Amino acid sequence: MGAPDRTLGPVEADEHLQELARLVDTAGGEVVGSIQQRLTTPHPKYYIGEGKANELRELARERGADLVVFDEELTPAQGKNLEDLLKIRIMDRTELILDIFAIRARTAEAQMQVELAQLEYMLPRLRRMWTHLERTAGGIGTRGPGETQLETDRRLIGKRIRDLKEKLQVVARRRATQRKARSGEFRAALVGYTNAGKSSILRGLSGAELFVEDRLFATLDPATRSVELPGGARILVTDTVGFIRKLPHDLVASFRATLEEASEADVLLHIIDASFGLWPEQKAVAEEVLAELGLADRPVILVFNKVDRLTHAEERALREQVRAIYPQPSVFVSAIEPGGLDALREKLLEELRELRPEVRVLLPATDGEALAAVYREGEVLRRAEQGEVIELVARLPLPVLGRLQRRDGIDVSRTA
């Protein structure tokens, strides 16, 4: 069930419902029908109009449905009113996505993140869940077991939310330590809309076995792999959780620690499904989430994947369109064709040379602080000692390079 706003054209509205159907399929359900309504503002009682709600009830009965899923987030009252009218389970898009994440979560960290988001979604909706007990409430001066259980559940959920947040803070600190340990290496993070092919690209770049499935949110946990570039240089590439339209804010907040991998990356690889007709909308959605995470200013390479599904003419038109509109560097790749990722490897090598140039550093052997900074924040390729002077050939981030150049007694020069 969808209620697209008036700014959407019929093609976009249909695609939104098709995406909702894919979400239902990912969650293990089977779609038996759909219905949509254009609204200026949501109806306070049912979200959709009363006549459309009755039409929905008849359609659900006719198709034998035992669940109705809305593409919009419902208020607790709207959900309760719809369940009272239809006499079947009502779920909104947010709850469906949370359910999928619960199914897909495999590690302890992902499970905690999903549980936290579910509990924060559930807390304001507890009253709806306990309405079946409210009928047993006593007379004046008494409270029924529904109200008592409601208060108990609120306290228990509040305590569990606090416990989960504390545990996730521990995980976040552990991740920060791990990132610090590999701070000298060039890192790229794969971001983008779910099912754009991020895991397939990481598998193709690294040669490592990774779980890949043609479904939404196939992987939730970040995976970091070493990738060899032309000339023998190596970098680290991290896959991150996919984004989607109307990604629940609680879920984004819960997965913030996981997505911090992207905040520490030298460059973001924004993966886009080139074969999908509405890819500009998916690109915009991913950029909104990145902005919400404070990553809008990170260096980005646009990676248009699945060009193997395009004709030569379509690919040529796409390249012209992208280069005319977007200022970011872009590459066009296929994760399944032989050599289909070569362009991406070359682009990553260019970024490595630009953001981590190879330099020769001559510094006094007594300057332990500068020496430690080079080893801590850069990648030392060679070292030689000439009396009281240490010569290092290293790849260094530009900020570190600037600090060294301003330091007395240190000589820095490019090797090429």
Image (cartoon, helix red, strand yellow):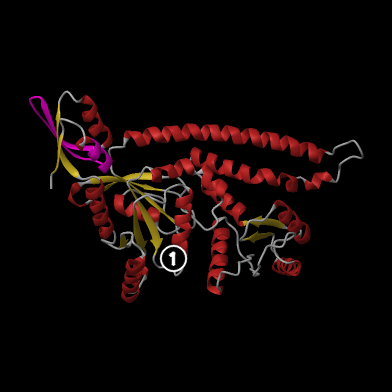
Whether 15 is drawn above or below 149: the answer is below
Residue at 66% over, 45% down: 122
Residue 80 at x, y percent in the picture: 74, 54
Residue 258 at x, y percent in the picture: 45, 42
Magenta stretch holds residue 89: no
**Taking 157 as reference, is 414 left or right?**
left
* The magenta segment: 379-403
**Taking 92 as reference, is 206 left or right?**
left
Residue at 53% over, 44% down: 253
Amino acid residing under circle 1:
Trp
Magenta stretch holds residue 396: yes
From this viewpoint, which residue is outermost toward the right? Answer: 140
Residue 102 appears anywhere in the view:
no
Q: Quadrant of the N terminus?
A: bottom right
Q: Label 1, on which residue?
A: 279
Residue 14 appears anywhere in the view:
yes
